[in-house]
Image (cartoon, rainbow, N blue to C red):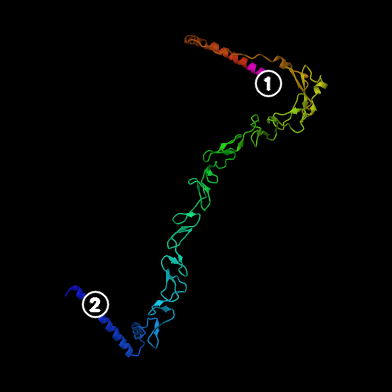
Amino acid sequence: MTSDQMRFLLLICSLISTIEAFRRNFDLARQSGGNTNIPLWKQRACEKTQKYKANSHYTCDEKGDVKCLPGWQGDLCQVPMCKRSCDPMNGYCQRPGECRCRIGYTGELCDKCIPLPGCQHGDCTKPFECLCKPGWDGLFCTEPSCRSGCHSTRGYCEAPGECRCRIGWAGRTCSECSTMPGCQHGTCNKPLECNCLPGYTGLLCQTPLCASDCNKQHGYCRKPGECRCKVGWTGTQCDKCFPYPGCVHGDCDAPWECNCHPGWGGMLCDEKLNYCVEHPETCENEGKCISLSREDGSYRCQCRQGYLGQNCEIRDEFLLTSVMPPRITPPPTDTDDDEDDDDDDDEDDDGEYEEEEDEDDEEDDSDQIIPNII
């Protein structure tokens, strides 16, 4: 017998066995008075003892048919009925009324996807995506999209649409240089420069250049080309001082002075100094009369040599005769060593001569002391 014939015989035998089993089951059901429309596996489920049906979720009716308990479904009531509207693809349940989400989904009904962990400004249409919202970029949508045209290296942003400039740069797109902090009247060609505009100077271009002829000590300016005078000074160049208020016939070398013109005196130079004119014979013995203010005594006499007193009226004979011409001592001269030896023999004579000179000097000094005291 060939192999094909053998396989055919085995197939015939299997078919016959199946038919016999069906017939026997049908006969048993008919003999027991059961419903032939109930599948045999259901009938056998109802024939189990209570011990084996403790974990089941069904009951059996009078006909031996399986009836599911509330919340369960399936042929043998082994499938729980999930919460109503629970997504059938993304959710499941192990007990009736539940809605447990599968990996990648969330929500009460498991109808929302979970984005990529770390996604900050993005959404998803399927699990573990990170689709950035407008204005954000990057793998986790953490990088804001700066304003259009914002310089890539000179500018940055912390929120979408911004363009914040880094140190040293300015402008809407951070393409312009920024002057040094504190620069008042200057420009820049590169970051943090302060090139002064015409008329200004200083590290921060904060100092205006005054008029060229403005006195640097007594004048100042608040804008270029000005010449404002400090207190006490006046004039276009601030080189003239203000005299003391009320000064009549005087001027000043420094503010608030009142230096009287010749012939005038007093605190305000308003007193005519004419005492000597009105009293020409005040000073005697050819003394010179100098008019003064009343506070200073009205006049002063400048006496000739040998005369004293307020009006030069005292003749001092001693001053007239005691004035002697100054004594001049000749400088020492160099001598030879031989002459020094010869002079040693005359030391006694020189000593006597020196004593005489000392006595003469003492007399001269006594003559000079008296005039100095007078």
Q: Residue at x 67, y 20 (%)?
A: 369
Residue type at numbered disc 2: Leu
**Residue 149 point in image, percent of width and height:** 51, 47
Task: In the displayed orientation, state which residue is furthest to the left.
Answer: 1
Viewer-nearest of labels 1 and 2? 2
The local crowd at label 1, few if under 14, some if 14 to 19, many if 20 or more residues have their Cα within 10 Å, is few
Left or right of 168, for residue 199: right
In front here: 350 or 338? 338
Residue 160 magenta: no
Q: Quadrant of residue 63?
A: bottom left
Quick one: quadrant of the C terminus?
top right
Left or right of 257, for residue 104: left
The local crowd at label 2, few if under 14, some if 14 to 19, many if 20 or more residues have their Cα within 10 Å, is few
Magenta span of residues:
362-374
Question: Of the residues under marks 1 and 2, which one precedes in the sequence?
Answer: 2
In front here: 231 or 297? 231
Quick one: quadrant of the N terminus?
bottom left
Residue 363 magenta: yes
Which SS does the magenta portion mostly show? helix
Q: Quadrant of residue 96?
A: bottom left
Numbered disc 2: secondary structure: helix
Q: Residue at x 81, y 23 (%)?
A: 275
Residue indicated by mark 2:
11
**Residue 26 point in image, percent of width and height:** 31, 86
Residue indicated by mark 1:
372
Q: Residue at x 30, y 85 (%)?
A: 25
Numbered disc 1: secondary structure: helix
Relative vertical location of residue 186 with respect to residue 133 in this rendering, above or below: above
Left or right of 261, for residue 337: left
**Residue 230 point in image, percent of width and height:** 68, 35
In this orientation, does residue 52 appear?
A: no
Relative vertical location of residue 21 with respect to residue 155 in this rendering, above or below: below
